[in-house]
Image: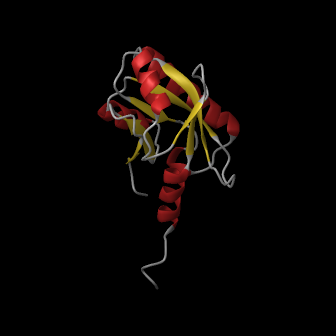
């Protein structure tokens, strides 16, 4: 067995890094990319008087495809939890730019600390989330390797 060949996990993480994280619920929709500063995200932070945010979904826990009705119910639970916590969020969708994987409805949760974002992502059995701090540079935060 060759050890230099990419594993399924490597492919998945590469897909997360390459994804377009579209914020559709902003007055002017925009796309965030992991590792690239987003002036639009910085503007959203300023408008909402926050210095951080998290792009989170409840779709396809564990990166395993689920039926649409199950995913929608999970997403409603995530949004209900954010509302309960008093977190403002904007609608979004995580998109595969190559179109191989279908988009996943998501939210940009404003003012959510990295630790709270990790807690939420784990609560909804996600493998990763995207978090941005004061620099408005989205970073991929791995929650579990497999």
List x then y, in percent, for residue 77. Answer: 53, 26
Q: Is residue 29 above or below residue 145?
A: above
Taking the view exactly as shown, the residue that stands out farthest to the bottom is: 1
**35 to the left or right of 8:** left
Name the residue at 53% across, 29% down: 107
The spot of residue 83 in percent (x, y) is 47, 16
Seen at 68% across and 46% down, the residue is 102
Q: Say which residue appears at 53% left-offset and 44% top-offset.
A: 61
Q: Please tell me which residue is depicted at 48% across the width and 57% down the height of the picture.
A: 13
Q: Nearer the viewer, residue 48 or 76?
A: 48
| Chosen colour scheme | secondary structure
Q: Nearer the viewer, residue 24 or 37?
A: 37
In the image, residue 49 sits, relative to residue 128, either above or below, namely above
Which residue occupies the extreme front position in the image?
39
Query: Which quadrant: the C terminus?
Result: bottom left
Pinpoint residue 105: horizontal percent, then vertical percent.
Answer: 61, 34
Total numbered circles:
0
Q: Position of residue 41 (x, y in %)?
A: 46, 29
Can you tell which quarter of the image residue 130 is in? top left
Looking at the image, residue 50 sits to the left or right of residue 90; the answer is left
Residue 135, placed above or below residue 66: above
Q: Is residue 18 left or right of residue 116?
A: right
């Amino acid at each position: 067995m060759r050890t230099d060949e990419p594993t399924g996990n490597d492919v998945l993480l590469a897909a997360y890094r390459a994804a377009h994280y579209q914020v559709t619920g902003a007055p002017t929709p925009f796309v965030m990319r992991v590792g690239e500063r987003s002036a639009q995200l910085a503007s959203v932070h300023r408008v909402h008087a926050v210095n951080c945010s998290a792009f989170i979904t409840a779709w396809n826990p564990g990166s395993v495809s689920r039926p649409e009705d199950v995913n929608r119910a999970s997403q409603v639970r995530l949004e209900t939890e954010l509302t309960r916590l008093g977190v403002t969020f904007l609608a979004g969708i995580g998109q595969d730019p190559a179109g191989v994987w279908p988009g996943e409805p998501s939210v940009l949760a404003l003012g959510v600390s990295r630790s709270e974002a990790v807690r939420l992502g784990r609560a909804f059995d996600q493998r990763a989330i995207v978090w941005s701090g004061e620099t408005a540079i989205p970073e991929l935060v791995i929650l579990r390797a497999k």
